[in-house]
Amino acid sequence: MMHVESEAMIPSQKKVNPLYRALCKFGSFFGFGSKLYGSNKRRKKIFFDVITYVVLVVGALTMVYPFWWMLVASVNGSTVDTLQTVFWPKSLIEGGIFENYARVIDKFDAFEGANYWRIVLNTVIYSVVPVVIGVIVSAAAAFAFAKIDFKGKNIAFFYCMFGIMIPFPALIIVQYCLYSAFNWTTNGLAMIVPGCFGSVMTAFFIRQYLYSLPTSIMEAAKIDGAGYWRIFWLFIIPLGMPAIMAQGILSFMGAWNNYLAPEMFIRSEEWYHMSIALSNLEGRISSDPDYNMAQIIAASVLALIPVLVLFGIFQKTIIGSIMLTGSKE
């Protein structure tokens, strides 16, 4: 009897292709290997799911590997090892894992009137103050264009959008002359004051998000006697917070990684932006007798960490808001 039952089970097992059985074993790593033994339609769906997972894993490794290489290279001791050791840091075995970071921080002291922590503080100020104020100003403009009817609204919005078409390099000379006349290039105000007036692109994306909010809320508030500013602070800001937060974080990342504007508008080492300090630091390290490419990479890692941490914390807010900002009633 047992022999007959075993014989009855063998044909059903033989119907499964060996390649398909191998795919089942591979799919078991993702938790759906046993589900592959179903209908043909289900088999095809699971098969394409496995292919999708494989492509996503390969793509993720391709994008993550450069950051891992930077981290590994930054903790190695010599230039040769920096370029050859790409999978595991040699310093973890030999010790001195933070040696390059300590040397880089010491080299920041060579800047006149500044050190590493002063430059970090400058960059935080350039990335936080104009972004916070500018995003609020942009949100107010977005509220006006999305929910308030006034004469010439479409024309005003058209001219604002037209300004986006003007490339930033075309305005650099004019901006530099203007900021120099106000003496903003020697005290960092050239990186703070202009950003406080907001951004057209930020206002545009927040405007698109505000279109998805019901107008009935604002009408009810107006019936109760609320003015536009009160509606903005009590209703628009809380309800539009996903888009405002996302645009604020993206603006922060752009300001933190900005290079062209600080290079043109900051003339004092005391007020250096991190990107300019790294650029000048590379030249100083290159002229050092103990030149080490790993020190330059370590400095780059120090500059990347805040942005990566911020994106990791708020990635759901950023991605969700970007998906919603394209919607319109």
Image: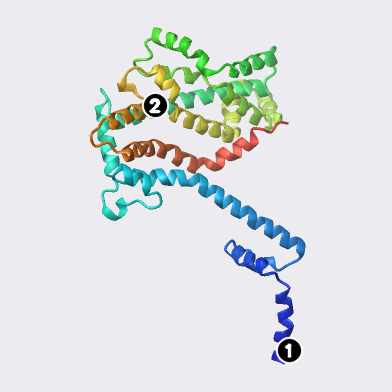
Residue 25 position (above or below residue 314): below
What secondary structure is found at the residue carrying circle 1? helix
- Which of the two discs, 1 and 2, labels the residue nearer the N terminus? 1
Question: Alpha-carbon distance for marks 1 and 2?
Answer: 80 Å
Amino acid at circle 1 = Val
Dividing the image into 4 quarters, which one contains the C terminus? top right
Q: Is residue 107 left or right of residue 278?
A: left
**Rendered residue at 69%/16% (across/down):** 154
Which numbered disc, 1 or 2, marks the residue closer to the eye? Answer: 1
Task: Say which of 244 and 285 sits in front.
Answer: 285
Q: Is residue 163 left or right of residue 191?
A: right
Percent x, y for residue 54? 59, 54
Q: Quadrant of residue 47?
A: bottom right
Percent x, y for residue 305? 40, 40
User: Quick check: can you spot residue 47?
Assistant: yes
**Rendered residue at 64%/57% (across/down):** 50
Amino acid at circle 2 = Ile
Q: Quadrant of residue 243?
A: top right
Residue 217 position (above or below residue 9): above
**Rendered residue at 68%/60% (across/down):** 46
Residue 194 position (above or below residue 64): above
Disc 2 packing (10 Å; few <14; some 14–19; many ≥20): some
User: Quick check: can you spot residue 75?
Assistant: no
Residue 4's disc number: 1
Residue furthest out toward the left: 289
Residue 244's disc number: none
What secondary structure is found at the residue carrying circle 2? helix
Percent x, y for residue 310? 46, 39
Percent x, y for residue 163? 59, 16
Task: Say which of 66 and 210 sits in front.
Answer: 66
Residue 125's disc number: 2
**Rendered residue at 31%/42% (across/down):** 79
